[in-house]
Image: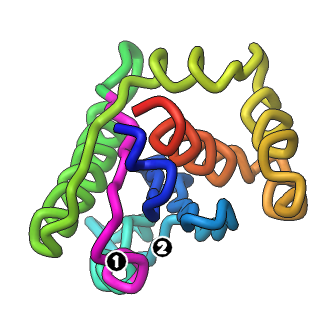
Amino acid sequence: HGRCRQMRVIGIDPGLSGAIAVINGTDSLIVVDMPTMTVERNGKAKRQVSATELAHILSSAKSDDCHVFVEKVSAMAGQGVTSVFSFGRSFGMIEGILAALHMPVTYVAPATWVKAVHRGAGKDASRSRAMELFPDNQADFKRVKDDGRSDSALIAYWGKHHA
């Protein structure tokens, strides 16, 4: 798959605090937070992924020569039913949009990309590794809440160099 080195690669960290990262053939990186919206459910305001905005972002990022890499995640023990359902809904939305746009996709387990990109341990490890690999984009990863951005960038980097 040496082809991935020249093509546009898109990395997606799914979920409400996730992000979408695009690496062009020139190795320039663009990172966008997962688009969300607030809806009312059972009288409570709930955040969810905006399908319309996500479809727009992905169709804008699509090129004739692109490949999408999505973190393959599953429900974790101890998560509430509501959060598991919400996450599954977001993941299914990503799957559906990619299918509708005919974008080639590979799902990658967290353990696979984390090890391959030499990310250390600890909650700031993704952000510091992303800053090392993408020095021009350090501002994208400076806040603690930017871990979704750094994960998506590292997933895209994995796809470009290891897939």
In the structure shown, which secondary structural element does the residue marked by tag 2 occupy? Answer: loop
Q: Position of residue 29 (x, y in %)?
A: 67, 64
Q: Is residue 154 magenta?
A: no
Q: Which callout, 1 or 2, points at the residue further toward the start of the chain?
A: 2
140 relative to 152, above or below = below
- In this figure, which residue is indicated by the disc labeled 1? 63
Q: Position of residue 10 (x, y in %)?
A: 45, 58
- For residue 59, what is the image quadrant? bottom left
Q: Label 1 neighbourhood size at 10 Å, few (<14), some (14-19), many (20+)?
A: some
20 relative to 80, above or below = below
Quadrant for the N terminus, please. Answer: top left
Q: Residue at x 46, y 72 (%)?
A: 36
- In this figure, which residue is indicated by the disc labeled 2? 35
Give the camera-side residue of 26 and 10: 26
- Image: magenta residue range: 57-73
- For residue 149, what is the image quadrant? bottom right
In the structure shown, which secondary structural element does the residue marked by tag 1 occupy? Answer: loop
Query: Which mark is drawn over residue 138?
Result: none
Q: Residue at x 44, y 77 (%)?
A: 37
Give the camera-side residue of 89 and 9: 9
| Three-letter amino acid code of the residue under disc 1 | Ser
Quadrant for the C terminus, please. Answer: top left
Q: Are marks 1 and 2 in contact (CB under 8 Å)?
A: no
| Three-letter amino acid code of the residue under disc 2 | Pro
Q: CA distance from mark 1 to mark 2?
A: 21 Å
Q: Position of residue 17 (x, y in %)?
A: 56, 53
